[in-house]
Image: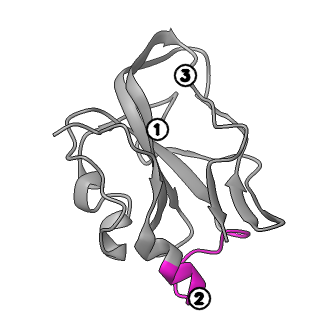
């Protein structure tokens, strides 16, 4: 199966956050790891352990460039967690490869996970809607103007 076209938050992670068992959205270091199209389509309803970097579908098929976009991903910059009215938003600055000579192929999506959490629990996965690549250049993940993830209550 393919990465798919959906971008979702993990239900088990939301539950764990609400119960105070996982992730500190205001204090953790979050990373973004890139994946190709040979993973099994991600599922937002998996158990918390299967949301983690290196577990479940996130255990293989990562796309990286040793120096420009490392294995385990890059730390998100300028992470924010804010509430406005009835909407909670998790956001960060667009993520750019470390340097200008990245070579990445068949990048279909990413996992955003907490590198602080002992289990490396995933917050969400984002589909890029198709194949993306760069050869000896800069790779940028541009997030939505409305944020990486939102919850409306």
Percent x, y of residue 12: 41, 75
* Residue in front for this viewpoint, 67 or 1: 1
Q: Which residue is mark 3?
A: 139
* Residue in front for this viewpoint, 143 or 103: 143
103 relative to 18, above or below: above
Which residue is depicted at the point 64% across and 57% down? 150
Mark 1 in CB contact with mark 3 (< 8 angstroms): no
Q: Is residue 114 left or right of 133 when viewed as pictured?
A: right
Outermost residue, left side: 1
For the stretch drawn in magenta, the main secondary structure is loop
Which mark's residue is nearer the viewer, 1 or 3?
3
Percent x, y of residue 40: 20, 47
Which residue is depicted at the point 62% across and 48% down? 148
Q: Quadrant of residue 107?
A: top left
In three-dimensional space, the C-alpha distance between marks 1 and 2, rounded to whole angstroms, equals: 30 Å
Image quarter (top left, top right, bottom left or bottom right) of the N terminus: top left
Q: Which residue is mark 1?
A: 70
Percent x, y of residue 68: 52, 27
In three-dimensional space, the C-alpha distance between marks 3 and 2, rounded to whole angstroms, equals: 35 Å
Q: Which residues are magenta?
A: 15-27
SS class, disc 2: loop
Mark 3 in CB contact with mark 2 (< 8 angstroms): no
- Mark toward the start of the polypeptide (1 vs 2): 2
Q: Which residue is mark 2?
A: 20
- Please tell me how crowded label 3 is: few (under 14), some (14-19), or many (20+) other residues with Cα within 10 Å: many
Which mark's residue is nearer the viewer, 3 or 2?
2
Question: Can residue 119 be seen here?
Answer: no
């Amino acid at each position: 199966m393919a990465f798919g076209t959906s971008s979702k938050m993990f239900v088990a992670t939301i539950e764990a956050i609400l119960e105070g068992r996982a992730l500190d959205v205001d204090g953790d270091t979050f990373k973004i790891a890139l994946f190709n199209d040979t993973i099994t389509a991600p599922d937002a309803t998996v158990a918390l352990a299967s949301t983690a970097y290196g577990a479940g579908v996130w255990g293989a098929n990562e796309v990286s460039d040793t120096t420009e976009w490392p294995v385990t991903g890059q730390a998100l910059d300028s992470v924010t967690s804010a509430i406005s009215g009835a909407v909670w938003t998790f956001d960060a600055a667009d993520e750019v490869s470390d340097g200008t000579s990245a070579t990445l192929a068949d990048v279909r999506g990413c996992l955003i996970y907490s590198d602080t959490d002992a289990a490396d629990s995933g917050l969400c996965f984002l589909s890029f809607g198709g194949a993306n690549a760069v050869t000896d250049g800069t790779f940028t993940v541009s997030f939505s103007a409305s944020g990486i993830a939102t919850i409306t209550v």
